Image (cartoon, rainbow, N blue to C red):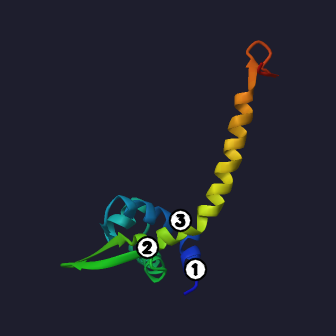
Amino acid sequence: MSDAPLWTALADPHRRAIVALLLERPRPVGEIGEACGLSQPSTSKHLRVLRDAGLVRVRQDAQRRVYALDPAPIAALDAWLAPYRELWNHSLDKLGRRLDETSYDTDTEEPTPKG
């Protein structure tokens, strides 16, 4: 299966806001729409995209449809991002070491080598 639907779903800021809400707890459609400032039809459209991408699950609770985050696609995304995170961590560690090697003269705010 292609990851394209996942990336497409997360490309929209409204859908990212919905995912963030569902990270806290499952919610009914009306609550999601209200929290995101969306109409019910617009909320349903965004939820359908998220559901088709596998990011959310839906269950019927009497007359309400309650949506919950499905962690599996997020875990796959996290695994895909791991090498990039490692690259950034390495770069930030190098910057931290460089900053540790340098002190600043508080009068002039000029860097001066430690030692």
Q: Nearer the viewer, residue 9 or 84?
A: 84
Q: Nearer the viewer, residue 37 or 79?
A: 79
Circle 3/circle 2 CB separation < 8 Å: no
Cα–Cα gap, marks 2 and 1:
13 Å
The quarter of the picture where residue 32 lies is bottom left
Question: Mark 1 sits on what residue?
Answer: 3
Cα–Cα gap, marks 1 and 3:
13 Å
Residue 75 visible at all: yes
Name the residue furthest left: 62
Q: Position of residue 34 (x, y in %)?
A: 37, 62
| Residue at (54% x, 87% y) in the render | 1
User: Mark 1, mark 3: which one is toward the viewer?
Assistant: 3
Left or right, residue 17 beside residue 70:
right
Left or right, residue 19 beside residue 8:
left
Quadrant assignment for the C terminus: top right
Q: Position of residue 61 (x, y in %)?
A: 21, 76
Q: Position of residue 37 (x, y in %)?
A: 43, 62
The type of residue carrying mark 3 is Asp
| Residue at (53% x, 65% y) in the render | 78
Q: How many marks?
A: 3
Label 1: which secondary element: loop
Circle 1/circle 3 CB separation < 8 Å: no
Label disc, if present, on residue 72 of the rendered structure: 2
Q: Residues within 10 Å of mark 2 (few under 14, many from 20)?
A: few
> Which mark sits nearer the N-terminus, 3 or 2?
2
| Residue at (51% x, 72% y) in the render | 76
Label disc, if present, on residue 78 of the rendered structure: 3
